[in-house]
Image: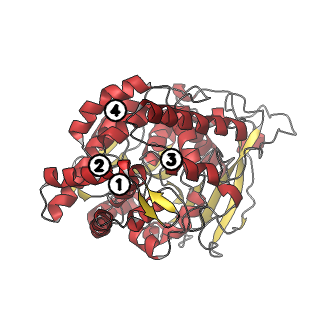
């Protein structure tokens, strides 16, 4: 499983205490709505269209009034695949969006929404849409669980979560069942050392994509971030907002940047936290994450009084030992790849560092349960062995976005450089460049996304100096790419993936922007 740019919204330690039940509960782990939820229109398109003029980059056939004029049927939400049913203050609905925005009069797919209306009806500003990253995170499931963090914003905004296309209830992509997922985790070496291991690694990744094509063939070519950005503009219209107000985290910053590029005149108040570098290609992202995770690991080791170089080599030795001889945990095994995933997830937040100390000590003494449980949390595997389909959606979106398909030879050529950057994460992330979209059945859209948004309203871009998954440098690049007077960089001197809710200074700055329209000075620093 790749270390992608997802958010860890809830405390890892809290979920572990609760039994790590974040995975799906459906048979075979296929809890997402299948892509069969595609419908064809029953009425011809109206000659009228959306009234606002998009940027040149957004020019496509106009959406028919049958889509822009939809009236939503808000109903009590059903229980998600994991966790409790949202309270009665939450309502769910679905918007019909074009399967192919180049053919807006054609087939449609559902775009799932969840909403809690603003507390202060008279002071209401509008709707505030959230994306929590991934790609592949379900906002319909996450927002009610995380809503306490955004209670202040909920006073004057309707809080709105959504499942992007290809995710969850929005024609969610499904690629393999629980047994196939478990077999892959147990047997495939993510840092292959022999020709046989290399062949098995590439075969498994190819099989994953083939499974997506078998199970989700119709929607798979249409899961791009660009298409979801266009969906958001339709949702904006259906919700009755003149401009989009949006809070994007992790991958959600890429989605937000794409929206701003396509529809700069429709940008309302946008905030990006834990920012993806829009200028980085596949290899660039892997290099950034190698640096970012090692930087966070170094900071962790310093915090416990251990020399980073010596500590990293100690962990690398443990991983090499697990590569040769995985630890038995009940009827499962802690492999090198699962151990590495367990280590990585604790680096998403400084509050998890004590758990990393415990997990490493246990593994060094031959007890792998803690690291395995951490890996299960990240991989969305519950105590019964069921997996959610977030990783399916994650790869479908990422590979539809990126046109790059590095080869195994190119990945191997990166290993010496990447190992020099990180003896712990380097080889894994080098191989990931070739494995992630190996022989993917859909051609990718582009090398890097566009985020330039001339004429857009100011967008807050929050970068954390110790962020492992989306290193701080990405925020600097995003602010620059958005353009002068648009990208407003806010620096958080701290640790972890995302600053809102953990840095009081950042939280105050973001709240003032969303609630009062107060734009901080470029380069404002917290911490």
- Residue 344 numbered tag: 1
Instruction: Where is residue 329? Give x, y as percent.
Output: 46, 65
Q: Earlier in the sequence, mark 3 or mark 1?
A: 3
Decide: few, some or many residues near mark 1? Use Cα within 10 Å; few <14, some 14-19, many ≥20: many
Residue at numbered disc 4: 284
Residue 139 can be seen, yes or no: yes
Q: Quadrant of residue 373?
A: bottom left
Residue sitting at the far right: 42
Q: Is residue 252 above or below residue 455?
A: below
Instruction: Where is residue 194? Give x, y as percent.
Output: 40, 33
- Residue 187 numbered tag: 3
Q: Earlier in the sequence, mark 3 or mark 4?
A: 3
Task: Say left or right for 173 vs 490.
Answer: right
Residue at numbered disc 2: 293
Q: Is residue 359 above or below residue 204?
A: below
Cα separation, mark 1 vs mark 4, equals 19 Å
Helix, strand or loop for disc 3: helix
Cα separation, mark 4 vs mark 2, equals 14 Å
Q: Earlier in the sequence, mark 2 or mark 1?
A: 2
Give the residue at x 47% y 39%: 260
Instruction: Where is residue 355? Give x, y as percent.
Output: 32, 69
Helix, strand or loop for disc 1: helix
Task: Single out the mark in the foreground, 1 or 4.
Answer: 1
Residue 521 can be seen, yes or no: no
Cα separation, mark 3 vs mark 4, equals 28 Å
Decide: few, some or many residues near mark 2? Use Cα within 10 Å; few <14, some 14-19, many ≥20: many
Cα separation, mark 3 vs mark 1, equals 20 Å
Decide: marks 1, 4 in contact (CB < 8 A)? Answer: no
Cα separation, mark 3 vs mark 2, equals 25 Å
């Amino acid at each position: 499983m790749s270390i992608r740019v997802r958010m860890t919204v809830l405390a890892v330690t809290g979920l572990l205490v609760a039994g790590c039940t974040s995975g799906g509960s459906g048979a075979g782990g296929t809890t997402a709505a299948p892509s069969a939820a595609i419908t064809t229109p029953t009425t011809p398109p109206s000659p009228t269209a959306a009234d606002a003029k998009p940027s040149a980059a957004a020019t496509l056939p106009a959406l028919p009034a049958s889509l822009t004029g939809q009236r939503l049927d808000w109903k009590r939400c059903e229980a998600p695949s994991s966790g409790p049913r949202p309270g009665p203050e939450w309502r769910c609905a679905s918007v019909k969006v074009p399967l192919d925005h180049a053919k807006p009069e054609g087939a449609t797919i559902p775009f799932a929404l969840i909403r809690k209306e603003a507390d202060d009806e008279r002071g209401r500003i509008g709707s505030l849409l959230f994306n929590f990253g991934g790609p592949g995170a379900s906002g319909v499931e996450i927002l009610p669980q995380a809503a306490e963090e955004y209670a202040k914003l909920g006073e004057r905004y309707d809080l709105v979560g959504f499942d992007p296309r290809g995710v969850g209830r929005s024609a969610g992509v499904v690629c393999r069942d629980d047994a196939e997922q478990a077999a892959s985790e147990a047997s495939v070496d993510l840092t292959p050392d022999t020709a046989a291991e290399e062949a098995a690694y590439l075969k498994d990744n190819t099989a994953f994509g083939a499974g997506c094509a078998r199970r989700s063939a119709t929607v798979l070519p249409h899961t791009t971030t660009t298409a979801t950005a266009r969906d958001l503009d339709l949702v904006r219209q259906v919700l009755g907002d003149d401009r989009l107000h949006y809070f994007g985290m992790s991958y959600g910053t890429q989605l937000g940047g794409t929206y701003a590029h396509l529809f700069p005149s429709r940008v309302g108040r946008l905030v990006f936290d834990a920012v993806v570098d829009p200028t980085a290609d596949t290899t660039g992202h892997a290099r950034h994450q190698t640096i970012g995770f090692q930087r966070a690991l170094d900071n962790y080791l310093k915090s416990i009084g251990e020399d980073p170089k010596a500590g990293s080599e100690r962990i690398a030795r443990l991983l090499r030992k697990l590569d040769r001889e995985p630890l038995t945990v009940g009827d499962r095994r802690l492999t090198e790849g699962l151990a590495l995933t367990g280590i990585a997830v604790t680096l998403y937040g400084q509050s998890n560092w004590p758990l990393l100390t415990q997990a490493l000590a246990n593994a060094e003494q031959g007890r792998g349960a803690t690291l395995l449980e951490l890996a299960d949390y990240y991989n969305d595997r519950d105590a019964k062995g069921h997996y959610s389909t977030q990783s399916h959606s994650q790869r479908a979106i990422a590979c539809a976005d990126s046109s790059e398909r590095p080869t195994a030879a190119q990945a191997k050529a990166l290993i010496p450089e990447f190992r020099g950057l990180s003896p712990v994460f380097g080889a894994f992330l080098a191989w990931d460049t070739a494995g992630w979209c190996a022989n993917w059945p859909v051609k990718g859209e582009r090398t890097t996304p566009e985020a330039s948004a001339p004429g857009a309203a100011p967008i807050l871009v929050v970068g954390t100096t110790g962020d492992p998954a989306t290193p701080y440098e990405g925020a600097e690049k995003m602010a620059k790419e958005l353009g002068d007077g648009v990208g407003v960089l806010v620096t958080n001197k701290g640790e972890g993936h995302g600053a809102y809710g953990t840095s009081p200074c950042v939280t105050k700055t973001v709240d003032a922007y969303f609630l009062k329209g107060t734009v901080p000075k470029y380069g404002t620093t917290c911490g």
